[in-house]
Image: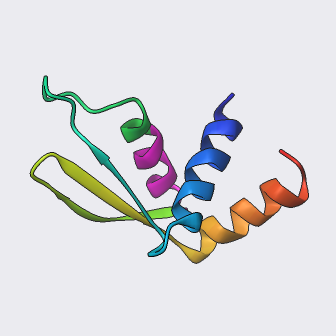
């Protein structure tokens, strides 16, 4: 279920020391499945991509993302 992925990824970003989440390309140059999920969260404004390069992509949670995460937690999504 998509909501579980959204909550998991937003929670991971919010819980990090710098409010960021990063993923690394696989050795075969493909991105893990979470790359498309993180990109989707960025497209709706819950994350902002802050860096990409050398096989590493990084997003930072936005105020909108924190609000969405609080809604998930409050609603036990």
Which residue sits furthest front?
Answer: 17
Span colored in magenta: 37-46
Q: Is residue 50 left or right of residue 74?
A: left
Q: Residue 34 is drawn in which quadrant?
A: top left
Residue 49 image point, x, y percent: 34, 62
The coloring applied to the image is rainbow
Residue 39 lies, with reference to residue 61, above or below; the image says above
Residue 34 lies, with reference to residue 51, above or below; the image says above
Residue 38 lies in magenta, yes or no?
yes
Along the viewing direction, whichever of 69 and 42 lies nearer the viewer: 69
Residue 11 image point, x, y percent: 62, 57
Along the viewing direction, whichever of 25 and 50 lies nearer the viewer: 25
Residue plotted at (38% across, 61% down): 59
Which residue sits furthest top?
Answer: 28
Q: Is residue 50 left or right of residue 7?
A: left
Residue plotted at (48% across, 62% down): 47
Residue plotted at (77% across, 65% down): 70
Q: Quadrant of the C terminus?
A: top right
Q: Quadrant of the N terminus?
A: top right
Q: Residue 72 is drawn in which quadrant?
A: bottom right
Residue 13 image point, x, y percent: 52, 61
Residue 3 image point, x, y percent: 70, 39
Taking the image as drawn, is residue 45 in sight? no
Residue plotted at (37% across, 40% down): 35
Along the viewing direction, whichever of 52 and 15 lies nearer the viewer: 15
Total count of labels: 0
Taking the image as drawn, is residue 3 in sight? yes
Q: Main secondary structure of the magenta part?
A: helix
């Amino acid at each position: 279920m998509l909501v579980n992925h959204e909550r998991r990824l937003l929670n991971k970003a919010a819980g990090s020391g710098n409010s960021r989440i990063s993923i690394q390309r696989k050795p075969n140059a493909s991105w893990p499945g979470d790359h498309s999920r993180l990109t989707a969260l960025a497209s709706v404004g819950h994350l902002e991509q802050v860096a990409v390069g050398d096989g590493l992509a990084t997003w930072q949670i936005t105020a909108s993302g924190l609000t969405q995460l609080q809604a998930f937690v409050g609603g036990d999504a």
